[in-house]
Image (tube, helix red, strand yellow):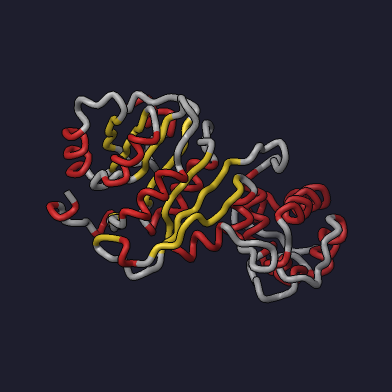
């Protein structure tokens, strides 16, 4: 099927064709009995076929009407696979499941377009009904950023890990795809957290604080935070002291829970700083 369909650059189509990689992804995404597999970007159906052997119900979502039509024809009589032609960024996960005859709980598996991979991951992690886990292919740099550890932490890593534990399952060369992309790829597994352990009272405000903290990542944290929040260094130091975080450290050195402590310290000492930053209007310290 791959050889008979021309990839659309506008949709970022690079189909994974390496058999060993496909099998490893299918195995990593195998759900518990009764769980639905929601496949994102079913493409030519190579992974779909393997997922059908590992799950009781597979809802294969494909935005390209050409490919969705072909897959729908192939699986028209299947009791396991149903095909949904939809944009995952425009349709809620519960509706995607309903359209394909799936149900909660569910897991997500897929080869994601590089240019919207992060947006898709975030959509599912923040959904009203998130999956139990995601096993997805992303650009390698994005995957590594999501899975970063303290010392090499990134803003994306903090914002992802507050919602899920992340590990890289597999690294893929361009030759594993048709057509071959110009970048390296990696498969990541994101297990959705029990938010009781890490929940913050306003996720968008937390994300705004993290972005502010990484505004000048090579600077010491007190200076980077001051730049990001548009406040004075003294005020930034006060927040850091309240959170028991050393302002001499770099943003990349902080652990996840230190960012959470920093967020609550900021909320406690100066709530408007985080709220204004979320709207793009940081306030300056009063002199």
> Which x, y percent locates residue 162?
64, 48
Q: Is residue 22 left or right of residue 269?
A: left
Query: What residue is shown at x 28% (from left), y 55% (from top)?
Result: 17
x and y percent of residue 241 in the render? 87, 60
Q: How many marks?
A: 0
Position of residue 204 in the picture relative to residue 95 (left or right) = right
Q: Percent position (x, y) of residue 243?
A: 83, 55
Outermost residue toward the bottom in this view: 218
Q: Is residue 262 above or below residue 233?
A: above
Query: Which residue is more in the foreground, 51 or 197?
Result: 51
Q: Residue at x 65, y 62 (%)?
A: 149
Can residue 201 be seen here? The reply is yes
- Give the side of residue 234 with respect to residue 140, left or right: right
Asked if residue 287 can be seen in this view, the reply is no
Would residue 250 appear left or right of 71 to someone viewing this image? right
The foreground one among 106 and 17 is: 17
Residue 9 in the image: x percent, y percent? 24, 60
Q: Residue at x 30, y 66 (%)?
A: 175
Snapshot quadrant of residue 283: bottom right
Q: Tell me the quarter of the image containing the C terminus.
A: bottom right
- Which of 172/5 is in front? 172
């Amino acid at each position: 099927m791959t050889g008979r369909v021309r990839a659309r650059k506008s949709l970022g189509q690079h189909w994974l064709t390496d058999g060993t990689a496909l099998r490893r992804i299918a195995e990593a995404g195998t759900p518990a009995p009764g769980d639905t597999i929601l496949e994102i970007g079913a493409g030519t159906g190579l992974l779909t076929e393997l997922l059908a052997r590992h799950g009781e119900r597979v809802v294969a979502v494909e935005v390209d009407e050409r490919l969705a039509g072909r897959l729908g024809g192939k699986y028209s009589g299947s009791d396991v696979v149903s095909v949904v032609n939809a944009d995952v960024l425009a349709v809620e996960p519960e509706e995607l499941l309903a359209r394909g005859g799936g149900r909660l709980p569910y897991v997500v598996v897929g080869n994601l377009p590089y240019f919207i991979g992060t947006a898709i991951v975030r959509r599912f992690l923040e959904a009203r009904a998130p999956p139990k886990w995601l096993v997805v292919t992303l650009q390698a740099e994005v995957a590594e950023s999501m899975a970063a550890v303290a010392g090499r932490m990134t803003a994306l890593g903090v914002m992802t890990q507050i919602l899920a534990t992340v590990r890289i399952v597999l690294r893929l060369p361009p030759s594993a795809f048709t057509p071959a992309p110009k970048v390296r790829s990696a498969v990541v597994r994101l297990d959705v957290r029990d938010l009781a352990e890490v929940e913050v009272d306003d996720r968008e405000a937390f994300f705004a604080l993290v972005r502010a903290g990484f505004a000048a990542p090579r600077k010491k944290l007190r200076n980077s935070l001051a730049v990001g929040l548009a406040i004075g260094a003294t005020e930034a130091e006060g927040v850091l002291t309240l959170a028991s975080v050393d302002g001499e450290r770099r943003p990349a050195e902080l652990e996840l829970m230190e960012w959470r402590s920093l967020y609550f310290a900021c909320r406690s000492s100066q709530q408007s700083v985080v709220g204004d930053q979320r709207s793009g209007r940081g306030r300056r310290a009063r002199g």
